[in-house]
Amino acid sequence: MLNFLSIQVSDEGHTSTGEKLSFVNLDESIEQHSEDSGICVSKSSTKSSPDHSSVGDGSILSPTNSRIEDIGKRAQDLIERINERRAMDQHVMNSFEEELTKKVSEMCQQVREQMFDYYEQHSQGIQAIITELSEVLEKSSQLSMELQEASQTLNAINKNLQHVTEQ
Protein backbone atom coordinates (compact mmCIF):
# COMPACT_ATOMS: atom_id res chain seq x y z
CA MET A 1 0.00 0.00 0.00
CA LEU A 2 1.39 3.39 -0.98
CA ASN A 3 1.13 6.34 1.43
CA PHE A 4 1.82 9.88 0.30
CA LEU A 5 0.66 11.47 3.54
CA SER A 6 -1.30 10.54 6.57
CA ILE A 7 -3.78 12.82 8.32
CA GLN A 8 -4.55 12.39 11.97
CA VAL A 9 -7.06 14.17 14.18
CA SER A 10 -5.64 15.46 17.45
CA ASP A 11 -7.42 16.89 20.47
CA GLU A 12 -5.72 20.26 20.70
CA GLY A 13 -7.51 23.42 21.77
CA HIS A 14 -10.58 23.93 23.89
CA THR A 15 -13.70 26.03 23.64
CA SER A 16 -14.71 28.48 26.32
CA THR A 17 -17.04 25.81 27.72
CA GLY A 18 -14.23 23.23 27.98
CA GLU A 19 -15.18 21.23 24.90
CA LYS A 20 -12.25 19.89 22.94
CA LEU A 21 -11.78 21.06 19.37
CA SER A 22 -10.53 18.66 16.72
CA PHE A 23 -7.83 19.96 14.42
CA VAL A 24 -6.21 18.13 11.54
CA ASN A 25 -2.41 17.68 11.42
CA LEU A 26 -0.10 16.24 8.80
CA ASP A 27 1.63 13.13 10.12
CA GLU A 28 5.22 13.42 8.90
CA SER A 29 6.34 10.11 10.41
CA ILE A 30 5.08 8.04 7.45
CA GLU A 31 7.64 7.38 4.71
CA GLN A 32 6.67 8.63 1.30
CA HIS A 33 6.62 6.26 -1.69
CA SER A 34 6.69 6.90 -5.40
CA GLU A 35 3.67 5.30 -7.01
CA ASP A 36 5.35 4.90 -10.38
CA SER A 37 8.55 3.18 -9.33
CA GLY A 38 7.73 1.67 -5.93
CA ILE A 39 10.95 3.20 -4.61
CA CYS A 40 10.92 4.45 -1.04
CA VAL A 41 11.87 8.11 -1.09
CA SER A 42 13.94 9.16 1.88
CA LYS A 43 17.08 11.13 2.59
CA SER A 44 19.21 8.02 2.87
CA SER A 45 20.70 6.52 -0.28
CA THR A 46 19.21 3.35 -1.78
CA LYS A 47 21.08 0.19 -2.68
CA SER A 48 20.79 -1.09 -6.20
CA SER A 49 20.74 -4.62 -7.47
CA PRO A 50 23.55 -5.89 -9.70
CA ASP A 51 21.27 -5.56 -12.74
CA HIS A 52 20.59 -1.84 -12.17
CA SER A 53 22.89 1.15 -11.91
CA SER A 54 23.48 2.76 -8.51
CA VAL A 55 21.12 5.55 -7.52
CA GLY A 56 23.61 7.08 -5.08
CA ASP A 57 22.33 10.26 -3.40
CA GLY A 58 18.83 10.11 -4.89
CA SER A 59 19.38 12.94 -7.39
CA ILE A 60 17.52 10.96 -10.06
CA LEU A 61 14.40 11.02 -7.86
CA SER A 62 14.59 14.78 -7.35
CA PRO A 63 11.59 15.71 -9.57
CA THR A 64 9.41 13.08 -7.88
CA ASN A 65 10.64 14.17 -4.47
CA SER A 66 9.85 17.82 -5.21
CA ARG A 67 6.34 16.85 -6.39
CA ILE A 68 5.80 14.92 -3.18
CA GLU A 69 7.07 17.87 -1.13
CA ASP A 70 4.78 20.19 -3.10
CA ILE A 71 1.80 17.92 -2.44
CA GLY A 72 2.79 17.75 1.23
CA LYS A 73 3.00 21.56 1.43
CA ARG A 74 -0.37 21.92 -0.24
CA ALA A 75 -1.87 19.37 2.11
CA GLN A 76 -0.38 21.22 5.09
CA ASP A 77 -1.78 24.54 3.79
CA LEU A 78 -5.17 22.91 3.33
CA ILE A 79 -5.04 21.50 6.85
CA GLU A 80 -4.11 24.90 8.26
CA ARG A 81 -7.03 26.52 6.43
CA ILE A 82 -9.37 23.81 7.73
CA ASN A 83 -8.13 24.42 11.27
CA GLU A 84 -8.52 28.19 10.88
CA ARG A 85 -12.07 27.75 9.61
CA ARG A 86 -12.89 25.41 12.48
CA ALA A 87 -11.55 27.96 14.94
CA MET A 88 -13.61 30.68 13.22
CA ASP A 89 -16.70 28.45 13.32
CA GLN A 90 -16.17 27.88 17.03
CA HIS A 91 -15.76 31.62 17.57
CA VAL A 92 -18.99 32.30 15.64
CA MET A 93 -20.84 29.67 17.69
CA ASN A 94 -19.51 31.12 20.96
CA SER A 95 -20.57 34.62 19.88
CA PHE A 96 -23.99 33.32 18.85
CA GLU A 97 -24.39 31.53 22.18
CA GLU A 98 -23.44 34.68 24.11
CA GLU A 99 -25.86 36.83 22.09
CA LEU A 100 -28.64 34.27 22.47
CA THR A 101 -28.05 34.06 26.22
CA LYS A 102 -28.10 37.87 26.42
CA LYS A 103 -31.36 38.09 24.43
CA VAL A 104 -33.01 35.35 26.50
CA SER A 105 -31.99 37.16 29.71
CA GLU A 106 -33.42 40.42 28.38
CA MET A 107 -36.69 38.72 27.41
CA CYS A 108 -36.95 37.05 30.82
CA GLN A 109 -36.43 40.42 32.51
CA GLN A 110 -39.16 41.99 30.35
CA VAL A 111 -41.57 39.15 31.14
CA ARG A 112 -40.72 39.46 34.84
CA GLU A 113 -41.44 43.22 34.76
CA GLN A 114 -44.74 42.66 32.93
CA MET A 115 -45.65 40.00 35.47
CA PHE A 116 -44.98 42.38 38.36
CA ASP A 117 -46.99 45.13 36.63
CA TYR A 118 -49.85 42.65 36.25
CA TYR A 119 -49.55 41.71 39.92
CA GLU A 120 -49.58 45.40 40.91
CA GLN A 121 -52.67 46.15 38.83
CA HIS A 122 -54.57 43.18 40.17
CA SER A 123 -53.35 43.75 43.71
CA GLN A 124 -55.07 47.14 43.71
CA GLY A 125 -58.31 45.55 42.50
CA ILE A 126 -58.01 42.72 45.01
CA GLN A 127 -57.25 45.22 47.79
CA ALA A 128 -60.44 47.17 46.95
CA ILE A 129 -62.47 43.95 47.04
CA ILE A 130 -60.88 42.93 50.36
CA THR A 131 -61.64 46.38 51.83
CA GLU A 132 -65.26 46.10 50.67
CA LEU A 133 -65.49 42.56 52.07
CA SER A 134 -64.13 43.77 55.42
CA GLU A 135 -66.75 46.51 55.54
CA VAL A 136 -69.53 44.04 54.68
CA LEU A 137 -68.30 41.58 57.32
CA GLU A 138 -68.14 44.35 59.92
CA LYS A 139 -71.67 45.49 59.02
CA SER A 140 -72.84 41.87 59.09
CA SER A 141 -71.29 41.43 62.52
CA GLN A 142 -73.07 44.56 63.80
CA LEU A 143 -76.38 43.39 62.35
CA SER A 144 -75.87 39.97 63.92
CA MET A 145 -75.29 41.58 67.32
CA GLU A 146 -78.38 43.79 66.90
CA LEU A 147 -80.40 40.76 65.84
CA GLN A 148 -79.20 38.85 68.88
CA GLU A 149 -80.14 41.77 71.16
CA ALA A 150 -83.56 42.00 69.51
CA SER A 151 -84.00 38.25 69.92
CA GLN A 152 -83.12 38.50 73.61
CA THR A 153 -85.51 41.42 74.03
CA LEU A 154 -88.31 39.51 72.31
CA ASN A 155 -87.54 36.47 74.43
CA ALA A 156 -87.75 38.60 77.60
CA ILE A 157 -91.03 40.15 76.43
CA ASN A 158 -92.40 36.70 75.69
CA LYS A 159 -91.51 35.48 79.20
CA ASN A 160 -93.11 38.53 80.77
CA LEU A 161 -96.28 38.00 78.75
CA GLN A 162 -96.40 34.37 79.78
CA HIS A 163 -95.99 35.41 83.40
CA VAL A 164 -98.73 37.99 83.15
CA THR A 165 -101.18 35.58 81.53
CA GLU A 166 -100.55 32.97 84.18
CA GLN A 167 -101.41 35.31 86.97
Image: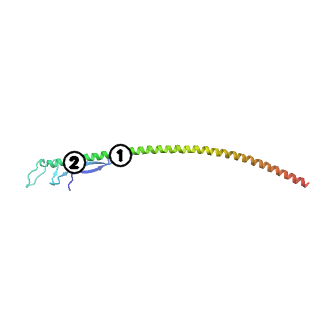
Residue situated in front as seen by the camera: 128 or 144:
128
The residue under label 1 is which amino acid type?
Gln
Question: Whole-Å distance between the Cαs marked 1 and 2?
Answer: 27 Å
Q: Which of the two labelled residues, at mark 1 and mark 2, occupies the earlier sequence position?
A: 2
The residue under label 2 is which amino acid type?
Gly
Measured as percent of width and height from the top left, residue 24 is found at 29, 48
Q: Measuring 76% from the left and 47% from the top, which residue is drawn there? A: 145
Q: Measuring 26% from the left and 50% from the top, which residue is drawn there? A: 7
Residue situated in front as seen by the camera: 91 or 39:
91
The total number of labels drawn is 2
Q: Quadrant of the C terminus?
A: bottom right
* Disc number placed over residue 11 in the picture, else none: none
Dot 1: within a 10 Å radius of its alpha carbon, few (fewer than 14), some, or many (20 or more) residues?
some
Measured as percent of width and height from the top left, residue 155 is found at 82, 52
* Disc number placed over residue 90 in the picture, else none: 1
> Seen from this angle, which residue lies furthest bottom?
1
Mark 2 residue element: helix
Measured as percent of width and height from the top left, residue 94 is found at 38, 45
Mark 1 residue element: helix
Q: On the rendered structure, is 2 left or right of 118?
A: left
Q: Measuring 53% from the left and 44% from the top, which residue is drawn there? A: 114
Q: On the rendered structure, is 61 left or right of 24?
A: left
* Disc number placed over residue 72 in the picture, else none: 2
Dot 2: within a 10 Å radius of its alpha carbon, few (fewer than 14), some, or many (20 or more) residues?
some
